Amino acid sequence: MHVMVIHHWPEDNPTLAQTVAETLGVLVFEARQRMAGGGPVVIGNFADPLQAESLRNRLEQKGVPTILIDTEALRNGAKLFRVRQFSLDDAVLHLTPAAGEVQNIPYAEIALVLPATTVVSQSESTTTVTERKFSFGKTIMAGGIPMTKKVKQEISTQSEERDEVLCLYTTERPPVVFRRGALNYAGLGTAMQMSRELNFAYLKSELRRRASHAVFDDRLLKRANQVRLLGTALDPDTHLDLTFEILARSYAGGEKNG
């Protein structure tokens, strides 16, 4: 699947939504709704790469900055560095993965920090509830005396566990991913606090302080913003990597199309 994203479009062009709608063959109302509130936003999904590339070129020619992402290539080529443990030195962030080599990243190399929430597990439980309800048949048999009967009903309840993640982009290295519930916080030393939530908040605040030059965008902490970015056709809980990639490419000016 090829996902088309528009971003950094000129806000002073009142006919831009109509241009997007005509190019993609959608309603103007739909285009305006997707573009409301600014970008980047996914404006279309295409199975045919040639069609996607053709439409992207047409939008670019009409002054609409566009990003095209091959989601299969993104998944197959992803080389995320998933952090298990970390420590914060004055000038360097030390990272240890669950498996693999340790990385030492100077704060000066950090360009973008993206916190987000996502579902890490889902479960469903079924409960049988027994109620007494009025029985018309029994009432007739009893000569009009109101009668009841037992009725069993199964009620299914779905629950989900959400966790916070942090995706860190540097100038040259693969993206670095921290997940709050999967981290060992021993590297904080005397700064380690009583809960994962507090330790993760400390990590975020320290990264903002030590890499103050980096862009910090926390819009993905709210699921509503994830849905607004991806649209209704893509599930944020299974496409979080795509939301990270979209924001990263948008901040980079739309580089690395494809």
Image: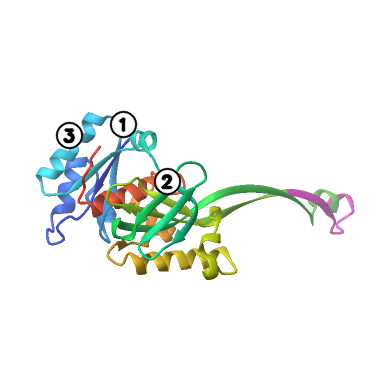
Give the residue drawn at x 13%, y 54%.
15
The residue pinned by badge 3 equals 54
From the viewer's side, name the closer residue of 159 and 99: 99
Q: Sequence order check: which comes first, mark 1 or mark 2? A: 1
Residue 96: percent from left, percent from top? 48, 50
Residue 43 appears at what percent x and percent y? 27, 46
- Tell me the crowding category of disc 3: few under 14, some 14 to 19, or many 20 or more residues within 10 angstroms, Cα based: few
Residue type, mark 1 in image: Ala
Residue at numbered disc 2? 81
Marks 1 and 2 in Cβ contact (< 8 Å): no
Instruction: Judge whether 80 appears above or below 76 on screen.
Output: below
Q: Mark 3: which amino acid?
A: Ser
Which residue shows up at 78% across the image and 50% down it? Answer: 151
Q: Which circle's residue, 3 or 2, is located before the other in the chain?
A: 3
Residue 89 occupies quadrant: bottom left
Q: Which contiguous range is marked in magenta? A: 140-153
Q: Secondary structure at mark 1?
A: loop
How did the renderer colour the structure?
rainbow
Side of 1 where 100 appears, left or right: right
Name which residue lies at 44% across and 52% down. Answer: 95
Q: In which quadrant is the N terminus drawn?
A: top left
In magenta stretch: residue 146: yes
Earlier-in-chain disc, 1 versus 3: 1
**Residue assigned mark 1:** 47
Inspect this view and state whether residue 141 appears: yes
Name the amino acid, label 2: Phe
Q: Which quadrant of the rendered structure holds the C terminus?
A: top left
